[in-house]
Image: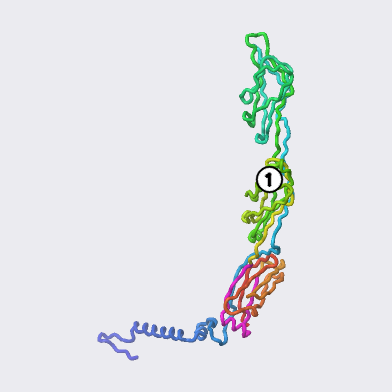
Amino acid sequence: MRLTRSKKGQPTGIGGGSVAVLVGIIAALIVIYILVLPPRDRAELLGENYTEDGDGDGGSSVSGNLTLLMENPGRLDYISQKEVEHTLPSINLFTTTNAVVLESRQSIYVKNAWFDKSFMNMTFSIPEMDNTENIYLVFNVKKHGGRLIMKLNGYDLVNNEISTASIEPIELPKRLLKEENVIEVFVSGVGWRFWSTNEYILESIKITADVTDISTRNSELVFQVTKTEKENIDRVFVKFFPDCDIRDVAPLNILLNSNKIFSSVPDCGMLRPLEVSPHLLLSGENRLEFSTERGSYLIDNIVVKSELQEMIYPTYYFEVNKSVYNGMNDGDLDVILYFEFVDDIEQKKAEVLVNGHQRGIDTRDREYDMNINGMIKEGNNVIEIKPKATLDVVTLKVYINKK
């Protein structure tokens, strides 16, 4: 290009702004060219894989492996029976009441004179106040003189002269009793007869009571419910057979996991079924408690039965477009169902349904796959897994393998 000089002697040529405009025009033309290219040519030019999803009846093209479904199912449980019975051992509920001696002394000597006095305190405990009745003080009198005075926890119990060797048992009122008690024993004064002495010698002193042992009137049974059973429970029944004498027993109380499900005197000698809410059963440890306040029960044939609903098996969906479907029918590609398990030790058994077509799995391998070409349809597809034993599935995948 020929250069000329300006009037000031400087050279002139193509300016920087003109170059930028030219570059922009060229770039725009390239972009337009790429956009108007056919999809296949455009993919080849840009170095991309091309998958034809058209609706035409022509051939199909799928490059490499294409994943149609990827899931992580985890543990799939299996229950072979329609119901689960928890058979529990027999229990015996009863109460026993025994006469016991709370405190005893061989002898007690008390006296009262002007210059010599002697008194005695007798202490005793009642550890189970609610289960203790008929509390009495008994003793014999060997020697007497004056009025014998006894106080129970500060309240007058005896205040009179006793001239007989044996006396009727003295009842200790329960309203005056506590867990720890004291009986004060002393004798009245001699008054103006300063030369005399009032005294008592008591022998074979005992405090007796009727104590009821309640440790055997309660019983607790424990049983386990699996997570699979819990998640599939439809109805729950508790059955038991009570052997008892209806005239001698108090109501029977039954609790399931601390929830009262029965409180009545049952028909003795007859099997009693109870339907309870499925929500009362827990996954894991469960407790069934029996108790009564009085009498004797032999509870036999104890069963907790769960009726199970129809198992709900995991179901997965995936789409197959026309190009994949045509490629499969043309023999250009395979649709593969792939499983990855947690180990290669346990036997894995399952029934696999693809669009209603059944295939079986029976293997110890950690990985397992199957060709499902003959089960696939264009559009929406469904896979259902029915385990025949508890199954741990790490990965479930459906993918296309181009031949």
Q: Which of 223 and 265 is in front in this view?
A: 265
Q: Which of 236 and 191 is in front in this view?
A: 236
Q: Is residue 157 visible?
A: yes
* The magenta segment: 313-339
Image quadrant occupied by the C terminus: bottom right
Q: Position of residue 267 (x, y in %)?
A: 71, 47
Q: Where is residue 62 in the image (x, y as percent from the top left)?
A: 57, 82
Query: Could you say which quadrant of the image residue 117 lies in?
Result: top right
| Residue at image coords 62%, 55% | 277
Q: Which of 4 and 273 is in front in this view?
A: 273
Question: What crowding class fits label 1: few (fewer than 14 Cα within 10 Å), some (14-19), or many (20 or more)?
Answer: some
Q: Position of residue 213 (x, y in %)?
A: 71, 38
Image quadrant occupied by the N terminus: bottom left
Query: Could you say which quadrant of the image residue 232 lies in?
Result: bottom right
Name of the residue lying farthest toward the left: 7
The colour scheme used here is rainbow
Residue that carries the numbered disc 1 in the rendered image: 265
- Relative to residue 167, is residue 33 drawn left or right? left
Q: Nearer the viewer, residue 134 or 41?
A: 134
Query: Could you say which quadrant of the image residue 193 lies in?
Result: top right
Q: Is residue 336 magenta?
A: yes
Residue 173 to residue 230: above or below: above
| Residue at image coords 66%, 66% | 392
Residue 275 to residue 342: above or below: above
Q: Is residue 258 visible?
A: no
Residue 290 to residue 25: above or below: above
Residue 334 to residue 228: above or below: below
Identify the amino acid type marked 1. Answer: Val
Q: Position of residue 61 (x, y in %)?
A: 57, 84
Q: SS at mark 1?
A: loop
Q: Does the magenta stretch include residue 138?
A: no
